[in-house]
Image (cartoon, rainbow, N blue to C red):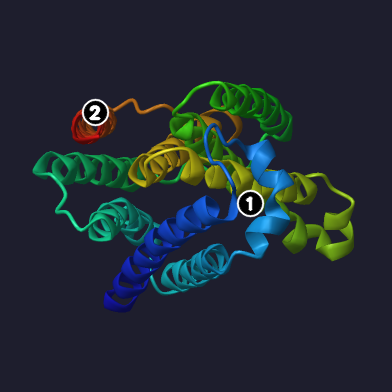
Amino acid sequence: MLLATALALSAALLNAGAALLQQQGIHLGLVSVERTDALRIARNLRDLAQQPRWVWGWSTDLVGYVLQAAALYYGSVALVQPLMTAQLLFTLGLVSWQRHEPPRFQAWLGAGAICTGLAVLLVTQGGSLSGAADRTKVLQATVVVAVLVTMLVIVSRNVRQGVLFSAVAAGLCTAMSAVFTKLTVDDLVNVGLAGTAQDWPGYLLLVSTFAGFLTIQAGFASGPLTWAVAAGLITDPIASYLVGILAFDVTLPADAASIASVVIALGLLVVGIVLLAHVSGRSRQHRAAMA
């Protein structure tokens, strides 16, 4: 358990550092980052690949993924996944270190509330993709998510702070990638590599993974890093839970304890979001006054 905890926290720290490096690389690699969206990121991937800081960020993210996989090997999902939410706290600390200013107490409180809310949700409702999948309903969910992601990308292109829209789109893509990963692994076990190559989940996994990559990069480019990380972290488990109810053998919470845990988790998320929004608004006003 101690090894899994250390690996999970290390992965969360590396993911936070990777996000910061990728954001810096995007700002250095693109002439202008105003209203940057996933489509523009896709068109400029060659330029970003030539930006060392962005490449270092992408490589660090890959190492973080490996450490997370190792943590899941040595520990349970119920232990590792809640610990991964510490990425938001690490991100807040790294951004403050970069700016040479301590984060506001309200920012720590808001990030802590979000991490606690996610941890409660993941521990109590974490088995959202367990059981057999209804493939027809998975495809229906895929269509709904594809429409939502498209709308979010379009909106992110037409607002000044598109970070939230891009990050929510990335969280939706990540949630669907988890669904397609489960189906692809089931194919590999049951029908082998040849059968998997003739089935659709593996190909949708590639599409959702690439779409998530583009949208989170757009989120890093278009607004505060803390907001991009927070929005993605919140959207992923909530979307996974909803897809689990729709397409997997997951029932809505019926007993008092389960309902209370969901209410508490959502309440903590709302409080955390309000606190971070308040701190972000005050920071913008302060920078405007100093200009």
Q: Name above or below for residue 189 compared with residue 175.
A: below
Determine the secondary structure under disc 2: helix
Question: Farthest residue toward the left?
Answer: 105
- In this view of the protein, which residue sits in the foreground, 227 or 122? 227
Q: In the displayed structure, does residue 51 sit left or right of residue 136?
A: left
Label 2 sits on residue: 281
Residue underneath mark 1: 182
Q: From the top left corner, tell me how far across and down residue 67 is, in percent.
A: 45, 72
Could you tell whether 72 is left or right of 40 in the image? left
Whichever of callouts 1 and 2 sits on the residue coming sooner in the sequence is: 1
Q: Callout 2: 10 Å neighbours few (<14), some, many (20+)? A: few
Identify which residue, 154 or 283, lies in the foreground: 283
- Asked whether 98 or 56 is in front, the reply is 98
Residue at coordinates 16% horizontally, 46% vertically from top-left? 108
Q: Is residue 32 visible?
A: yes
Residue 60, image x and y in percent? 49, 69
Amino acid under label 2?
Answer: Gly
For the point 60% across and 24% down, the residue is 148
Outermost residue toward the bottom in this view: 3
198 to 125, vertically: above or below: below
Q: Is residue 246 left or right of residue 163?
A: right
Location of residue 212 by image quarter: top right
Residue 128 percent location from the top left of the image:
48, 41
Say what secondary structure mark 1 lies in.
helix
Residue type at tag 1: Lys
Q: Is residue 41 above or below residue 244?
A: below
Asked whether residue 250 appears in the rendered view, the answer is no
Which quadrant does the C terminus fall into? Answer: top left
